[in-house]
Image (tube, rainbow, N blue to C red):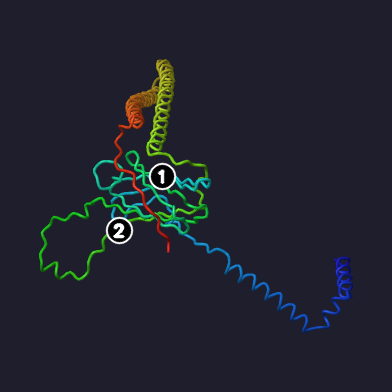
Amino acid sequence: MDVLDKYIDAFKERFAKLPFIKAFRGKVILRKVIIFLTLFSMWLSLLAGALFSPKRITYSKQQLATSKSFENQSGKIELTKQVYSADNQILLLQMETQDYTGVIAKGINAKNLKWKLYAKKYSEKTRMEIIPLTNNKITLVIQNLPDDFEAIALEVENTTPTGSDVDISIKSYDEESKKKTKVKELSNKMLFIVTAQNQKMEEKKLKYVSRESFSLDIFKEERAFQVKQIEQMKKSIEKLEESIKEDQSTLENLTREAEYKVGSDLEVINNNMTQIKTSMNTKGLNIKQAENNIATLEEVVASIDKAIEAVKDGSYQFNAPVTSFNIKEIQ
């Protein structure tokens, strides 16, 4: 440590003897002016950055959520895909809907959905097309959206009647007139916010295609998914059959061993044999269930093939027409 201290003291002594250091020490006012100017320039740079840099708007996780339900429990909408093509300024959004008002599982009737589009930056040519596809799927195509659009907002209104909208009871005038507060109506609107910079946004070249092309892509994706399920079911059946053969072999071995066992040892073997038989029975039931599932999935694939042919020959009946909307500025 003594050697290190000597080196430090020697450096300080040499540094203090430098001409500009001596001059600076002797001029207190100059030193203060230089310090002030340094701090002032730093303050100016911060101020300029705040004034001239683009304003950044932060959104909450709830605002950026891609799956939302209507407050009045009329349904649910999920934003499943976001693709932006900077080459031709097209933003593609794919939605899946779920209706809560009916007794069967289905999508929301596209005719009952009213849309509004807002954006921070857009051109006079920016417009949005709503393309209802199959069952519960809807595609939104926003054309001529500049690559610096920052963010867009989609307002969706669901006009589907709900159970809360229906009231067939007879009310007393006196009782109703005494009510001072009105019950707040649950909202049938929701808002999706899509930002240019988000992890779920894909960037790739797109070309505007017809509703039929979108539908064919969706049908083909679903068909591939169902075929994959059928293949998995068949593999599961093979594994279950192999497992049953192994159980059968074990059961035969235990049966032979039981001939030479008595008392508690025989009881243990009998219990093991009972468990194996139960397992074999369960596996057999699983095979039957898998075979039934395969038959159902094959019907689904056949139905999809029929729909694909109908789209190709123009006879497919879509559940709503294509509609176009102009854009509004986000305030």
Q: Amino acid at mark 2?
A: Ser
Q: Nearer the viewer, residue 140 or 10?
A: 140
**Residue 25 screen position, x and y as percent:** 82, 80
Q: Which numbered mark, 2 or 1, is in the foreground of this view? A: 1
Q: Which of these two is toward me, 324 or 119? A: 324
Give how far across and how far down residue 236 sits, in percent.
Answer: 42, 26
The quadrant of the picture occupied by the N terminus is bottom right
| Image quadrant in which you'd find residue 103 | top left
Residue at label 2? 187
Q: Residues within 10 Å of mark 1 (few under 14, many from 20)?
A: some
Give the label on residue 258, or none: none
Drawn side of residue 317 relative to residue 327, left or right: left
Q: Residue furthest front?
A: 124
Q: Say left or right for 269 vs 50.
A: left
> Which image quarter is the C terminus in?
bottom left
Q: Residue at x 50, y 46 (%)?
A: 88
Instruction: Give the residue at x 40% y 15%.
Output: 259
Kindly state the secondary structure of the residue where label 1 is placed.
strand
Say if mark 2 contacts mark 1, CB within 8 Å: no
Please report the residue visible at 41 percent of the width from the left and 47 percent of the height from the top: 79
Which residue is identified by label 1? 94
> Left or right of 102: which side holds 311?
right
Residue drawn at (13%, 55%), measured in percent from left and top? 168
Q: Earlier in the sequence, mark 2 or mark 1?
A: 1
Q: Is residue 291 above or below residue 83?
A: above
